[in-house]
Image (cartoon, rainbow, N blue to C red):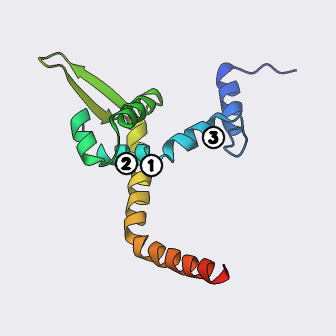
């Protein structure tokens, strides 16, 4: 029986990640990054650090509770960093980490794709709804 080093064990575990498996940790990460608020917050941070109130203005419709929860989740997963500057009042900025910047092009692409294809999606919805109404 061969003994594996810690590095070899991590590499073996990494090769076994499969989001289709219920207990795989990548499933939770996939759920996190596919959340609408996560994607919008990441894209809102594309131009650099933002304060909480600025993010709440940029991401229209997000409740304070959801913004706080989203920021904490992203910070926990290493996608953003929270920087507190001692001043009166205390200043808190949120910024993308290297990991968040690596994910950013994908999120920007999804946002852009949605904006570019919205007319086609609306048309498909109308066709579907008319077909559904005709069958009723």
Give residue 34's position: percent from left, percent from top: 51, 48
Give the Cα separation between the discs numbered 2 and 3.
20 Å
Q: Which of 43/71 is in front?
A: 71
Give residue 49's position: percent from left, percent from top: 24, 36
Total label count? Answer: 3
Instruction: Identify the residue under disc 3.
Output: 27
Q: State whether residue 2 is above or below residue 36.
A: above
Q: Secondary structure at mark 1?
A: helix
Whether residue 120 appears in this view of the structure is yes
Give the Cα separation between the discs numbered 1 and 2.
6 Å
Q: Which of 24/101 is in front?
A: 24
Q: What numbered label is drawn on residue 18?
A: none
Residue at 40% x, 39% y: name it: 100
Residue sitting at the far right: 1
Give residue 36's position: percent from left, percent from top: 44, 49
Residue at 42% x, 64% y: name it: 114
Give the Cα separation between the discs numbered 3 and 1.
16 Å
Q: State whether residue 61 is above or below residue 64.
A: below
Residue at 23% x, 44% y: name it: 57
Instruction: Identify the residue under disc 2.
Output: 40
* Circles 3 and 1: CB atoms closer than 8 Å: no
Q: Residues within 10 Å of mark 1 (few under 14, many from 20)?
A: few
Location of the C terminus (image quadrant): bottom right
Image quadrant of residue 86? top left
Q: State whether residue 26 is above or below residue 131.
A: above
Whether residue 46 appears in this view of the structure is no
Q: Is residue 126 left or right of residue 109?
A: right
* Circles 1 and 2: CB atoms closer than 8 Å: yes
Q: Is residue 90 left or right of residue 28?
A: left
Q: Which dot, 3 or 1, sits closer to the camera?
A: 1
Q: Is residue 123 left or right of residue 11?
A: left
Instruction: Identify the residue under disc 1.
Output: 36
């Amino acid at each position: 029986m061969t003994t594996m080093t810690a590095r070899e064990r991590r590499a073996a575990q990494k090769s076994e990640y499969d989001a289709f498996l219920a207990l795989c940790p990548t499933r939770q990460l996939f759920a996190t990054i596919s959340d609408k608020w996560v994607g919008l917050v990441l894209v809102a941070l594309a131009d650099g650090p933002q304060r909480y109130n600025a993010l709440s203005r940029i991401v229209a419709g997000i409740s304070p509770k959801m913004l706080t929860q989203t920021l904490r989740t992203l910070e926990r997963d290493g996608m953003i960093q929270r920087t507190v500057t001692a001043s009166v009042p205390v200043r808190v900025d949120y910024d993308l980490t290297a990991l968040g910047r690596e994910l950013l092009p994908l999120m920007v692409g999804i946002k852009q794709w949605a904006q570019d294809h919205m007319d086609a999606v609306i048309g498909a919805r109308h066709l579907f709804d008319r077909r559904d109404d005709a069958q009723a």
